[in-house]
Image: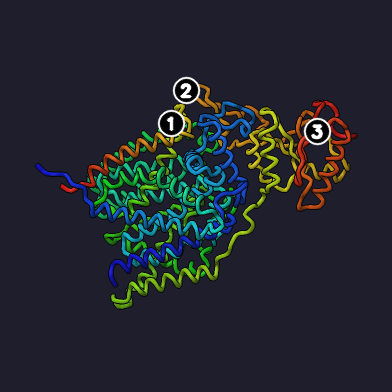
Amino acid sequence: MNIKKTVLLEISIIFLVLILLFNTFGNLWDKRIKHEFPYGYLATDTYQHQTRAQWIKEAGNYRYEGEHYSGNYTDVIGFYPPIIHHVSIILSNATNLEVYDTIYFFVILSMLFGVLLIYFIAREFNVYLAILSIPLVLFIFVIKGSWVGFLWGHWPAVLGDFFLLSFCFMLSKIKIKKSYIPLAITLSGTALSHTASTIFAGFILIFYCAMKFWKKELNKETIITLVKSIILFLIISGYFLFLFQGTWMHAQPYKFRITTQFDMGGGFVRLIDFQAVYYIILPGLAISTFFIKKNNNFPFFITLSFFILGLTNYIGFGSRAFNLRFYWPISLAISLGIVGYLVLNLFPKKIRFLFAIILSLSSIFFIYNNYYSTFGDGRAFMSQELWDMYDWIKNNLPENANIFYFYGDSYDQFAHVGNTNRLATRIEFKDYFNMIASNRTIARNVKAWLFNEHGAGLPYKKSLLQFGYRDEEDKRTQGPLDYDLCEFKYFVIDKLSRIPEAMAINQITLNKIINTKNFEKIYENKLSVILKNNKQGGECIEV
Amino acid sequence: MSVLKFDIEFITKEIKMLVLSILLVFTLLKLAFSSEDSFVLIKLITSLVIVFFLPYYLISIYWRDELNFAIRAVISLVIGFIVNGILGYYLGLLGLSVNYNYVIIAIIFYMIGGYISYKYLQNE
């Protein structure tokens, strides 16, 4: 078979895999790129990133966090790894698409490029391995522990994995001229997208040097390149690493923790999740260890490194190890390919390429046919009515308004309220339901949560090198606490609910509030009503 | 004295592959997002190419003898994302709004890329 035909077949296989992945996401996105409101946002974390990016776009910079999700503090320093937000803002400005579309598109695009990278990494060994490895990536949208990374908003983690894979790819190209520059840039990509990935990059570098040393290939040039890349990395990432140690490292310091539970939602990838394919990739991983000795061993080194580091939850890395497993359908792909490659060697050389194509297509068909499914309604817990209400609040209520939310089906996953750019306090649901069920009314003092993103302790600069933490100084940010309802000026009450009892409870509340005659309806749509308290501190519940 | 001439054969081949890649991406997007207006997709692809890809692709010509087109293309976009994300962040901290500073970033990297490609697209 001539080279042109070979390349064409290769492109066709890659294209088929990419279209299957992209199409799955396309279905969730209603086959559109541009939406009237956030689409496919299946968990609160997705909104956390979207609202932060929107805030940065409106502020023009990321010096500080938005006060509306920082307990009303204006000095909380921008602490989140910023690449995802800035890329999505730039893409939004360049395309006129909304940030809620571009941020999600960027995450999915990075996944597709991750697939291309693993293909190129496998191709370092040979084209057969690449073609036979690629079908495993389809498990991204099969295994819940993997797709939650993309659809539930573990976006910094999956971007960190992507840049880590990019860094590994550049490591495979360490012999090219000035390779320290792309090495340093990709390593910086890990630090400013998900800093835990930088730690894993450090381990991969140690493994790499150990492997090179063992094979007596660790020469002066390699060491100099690595040192140069680390120096350049520190120059690029230094400021953010300084912020990181003063914020995240303070709020969530490393603790030696052996765990088999992922406490961030959605579960994690286990080898058994690859179902029947598990019985191929398990021996594939074992076989990969033998190929480490070969000259062209980098693909096996990558697969084994991602596999071993993904198991570090058993030696004290806690749930960070699971973050790396989001990418296992991509990073372990070579363990599938190597088994197929060994089978392929049983056939005459002349028909190997053709057989590799057939085997790869069969694997794609098998995985797609047996395990693949599409995702449901991409609107999830966002609706046109909810979005319209948020938009109205953002454009009509005073900037310092603190809005009180009663029960709503969508308010359990509450980060989307950040789209109002206003402080939000949400009633504690269980307490609320119990109160109405037992007394048929609501008390003036209720338990509620002040919405805020206090994951890094709401840090602020005390001096040039010293941080303070609003989270430790102000207990409101941790909730739930007792609040006097009547002190709030604006109430949001949902009229519709999937739970009939909840709808009835909200109706009771609405009547009790309206009957005081101290309120006026300032906004209403099919879903919600917004009431304005004209007598703050006065009577707000009919006794 | 040696006369510098552009490597037309290489440039033609690269342009062909660039155009083909863009067409493939467009087809991919059109298939996955079939209800979307083609104009939106074209605008999206154009923005990705102009802001995140082309400047870094021009720089990647420095490695034309060591890396093939496909690898350079993928790495260019990865680097483009990182550079825009990081510089956009730092320039924002320095007071240049993130809503505009990507233009400055693009200009800087087009200049670097232009210089590198000018230098390395020539045959002695």
Q: Secondary structure at mark 2?
A: loop
Coloration mode: rainbow
Distance of label 1 from label 2 (alpha carbons): 19 Å
Residue ID for mark 1: B91
Q: Is residue A251 visible?
A: yes
- Please identify, in this view, whether the residue under mark 1 or under mark 2 is nearer the observer: 1
Identify the image quadrant of residue A337: bottom left
Amino acid on which disc 2 is placed? Leu
The numbered dot on residue B116 is none
Amino acid on which disc 1 is placed? Leu
Residue ID for mark 2: A464
Q: Are marks 2 and 3 on the same chain?
A: yes
Q: Nearer the viewer, residue A310 or A155?
A: A155
Residue ID for mark 3: A445
Label 2 CA crowd tier, 10 Å (few <14, some 14–19, many 20+): few
Q: Looking at the image, which residue is at 81% across and 48% down?
A: A503
Q: Is residue A491 left or right of residue A387?
A: right
Label 3 CA crowd tier, 10 Å (few <14, some 14–19, many 20+): few
Q: Chain of mark 1?
A: B
Distance of label 1 from label 3 (alpha carbons): 47 Å
Mark 2 / mark 3, whichever is N-terminal:
3
User: Which quarter of the rendering shows the C terminus of chain A?
Assistant: top right
